[in-house]
Image: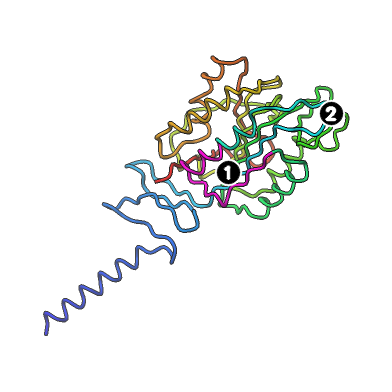
Amino acid sequence: MKKAILISLFCLLQVQYLNSQIVSSEKATVHINNKAKLNINADGKIISGDEGTDAKTLIMGKFYALIIGINDYADPLIPSLDKPVRDCEMFYNVITTRYTFNNENVKILRNATMAEMVDALDYFAKKVQPEDNFLIFYAGHGVYDKEADIGFWLPSDAKKSSKLAWFRNSTLRDYLREIRSKHTLLISDACFAGSIFIKSRGFADATAINKLYELPSRKAMTSGTLTEVPDESAFIKYLLDRLLTNNDKFLSSEQLYSNFRMAVINNSNAVPQFGVIQEVGDEGGDFIFILRE
């Protein structure tokens, strides 16, 4: 009789221990030697614990992306491009296969009009939550008005003679304030893309992923400064190469940029840029790319 009671108590304790590991009905953290392993729940949310002895992170939220590539322009005075749509499709394939961007959370716009770009940003402004991560990728024509000190993206329905359908940097900044992500990263491969920065700043090496993720961020990397860039983009070539060959579980946008910056400079006339988008909520954190299991 005593033996049966002891066995029952032991089983009850085991059940209680297992129940204590459950975070919710859809996600759980698996402990091995009291260290938690990175996991992804059914909704694509990232749940991570320890990654090695000192790399404890807590990364929650989904990863969203808006990818825009424009080759063709309705106005014959704006020359068409050959590579942006192809580059966008390659970028889409990399982030949805190697990194934790689920297909249903990524929109890719080919030869987008002004209305389509605005509609997509409105969608993400409603969809993205404060714990989520948001990435914008743009490849196409860019214009810089030196006298007004304003930069623009050119949608497919833009006209050279009118700014009515030119997408202003100030409009983009407004959306970056409105989209309430934990981290936002802008990647722009366009002429005069550096005009998105009000001012640039240097950055220091950072290895504490949990510290980078803890603070909100609004960062951008661009293919150049206030100059024209070629249609055959060394920036895209080496960006994609580093994303494809990266084997680090966690890769900050700062580290990604530093990994390919010199390759771009050494193989083109462009000088890529990385920095903070001012006055839209950056607090010193960074966007983290996470490899799939």
Residue underneath mark 2: 160
Compute the Cα span from label 2 to label 1: 34 Å
SS of the residue at dot 2? Answer: loop
Q: Residues within 10 Å of mark 1 (few under 14, many from 20)?
A: many
Per the image, label 1 sits on a secondary structure element best described as strand
* Residue at the spot 64% in from the left edge and 54% down from the top edge: 127
Residue at image coords 71%, 21%: 226
Q: Is residue 293 magenta?
A: no
Asked which quadrant contains residue 140, the reply is: top right
| Percent x, y of residue 97 | 47, 43
Question: For the magenta stretch, what is the residue range?
Answer: 91-110
Q: Residue furthest bottom?
A: 1
Give the residue displayed 59% in from the left and 52% down from the top: 130
**Residue 77 percent across, percent down from the top left:** 83, 26
Q: Measuring 68% from the left and 43% from the top, which residue is drawn there?
A: 176
Mark number for residue 107? none
Label 2 with label 1: CB-CB less than 8 Å: no
* Labels 2 and 1: the sequence-earlier one: 2
What's the residue type where badge 1 is placed? His
Considering depth in this image, is 214 or 292 the residue closer to the camera?
292
The residue that disc 1 covers is 183
Residue type pointed to by label 2: Lys
